[in-house]
Amino acid sequence: MRIAILGPLAATHHGRPVAPTAAKPRTVLGLLAAYANDVVPVETLIAELWPDAPPRNARTTTQTYILGLRKLIHAAAEAVGAVPDAKQVLVTTPVGYLLRVPPSSVDAGHLERLANVGHRARERQDHQGAARAFAEALSWWRGPAFMDVQAGRKLRVYAQRLTEIRLNVLDCRIEADLRLGRHHELLGELSTVTAQHPTHEGLVAHLMLALYRSGRRCEALDAYQRLRAALVAEQGLEPAPALGRLHRSMLNADQATTDLTETWQATHGPARRTAPQARIPVEAAAMPWSVAPQA
């Protein structure tokens, strides 16, 4: 069985679609897929299906939904001449139900696995490897998780967790691309994503650096002011100190062409006495924006 939850819910068994079309059975499949290979108690399913007031026959109705899912799984196997295995795929336990699938069958697992590969590459300062792994992780994303599923509290929390993972992976992929000197290529994407997340300080910092290195210092400074206004208005907060240091460095910077076109990697490398000095101090421009420079 293969299951996709990073966007519209989709499931296939032996290549045949098995996702139900009715709302509540889709919720059951979504919850079982989110916690694949773990037992989901009946009470948890009932709470997800009827968050306010479960009907008296809630348990029986839930069993009916499980039977319906098994029929779809059975029919998919039968259609291709495979051994019917519905009860081995959707398992009944003393307390609930378990969807037994290989870990690689759920797309969210690939997102998290590749994100971990990217983080390990990032720790090794392998920016090319990190950018590649993070980009591959993001390629599994087809839209908001469970976007066509009637989600209760449990699925909403799980979907929010996946959204946070995606945003973190996006942040890290853009940072890796900046370190590889891809500031011109990132401007369109960063303009869009910071409009969607106007108070995300990491993404705005990336936008500032990309604009600065593209010769657009005034726009980089404007991006900081928009972030500051949004933070003050929405949360009563000033930008983080590291972001303030980056802003001050840009305010004091000379707009010399050599400074503006210098790649992140060049700035990140060890300083040489004969090399032109970047106007943005190395500790502000080369290190991840959230890391305070050493005294």
Image (cartoon, grey):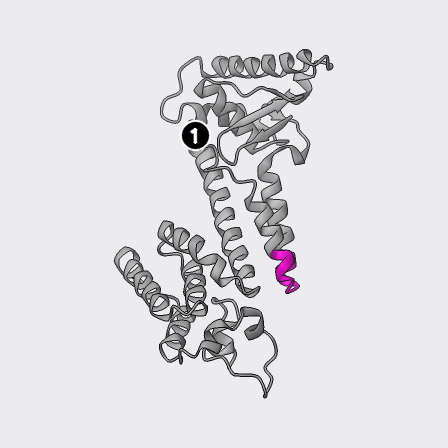
Which residue: 44% across, 53% down? 189
Question: In the rendered image, is residue 112 in sight?
Answer: yes
Question: Does residue 253 appear left or right of residue 124 in this picture?
Answer: left
Is residue 121 a member of the stretch shown in magenta? yes
* Residue denoted by label 1: 151
Is residue 172 a member of the stretch shown in magenta? no
Category of crowding for the residue at label 1, using alpha-carbon neighbours closer than 10 angstroms: few (below 14), some (14–19), many (at least 20): many
Amino acid type of the residue that numbered disc 1 sits on in the rendered structure: Ala
Which residue: 62% across, 26% down? 99
* Chief secondary structure of the magenta portion: helix
Residue that lies at the very extreme toward the bottom in this rendered image: 273
Residue 288: x, y in percent? 51, 67
Question: In the rendered image, is residue 293 in sight?
Answer: no
Residue 155: x, y in percent? 47, 33
Between residues 279 and 281, which one lies in front from this camera angle? 279
Where is residue 82, by image quadrant? top right
In the rendered picture of this protein, how many numbered marks are placed on residues? 1
Is 20 situated above or below 258? above
Q: Which residues are magenta?
A: 119-130
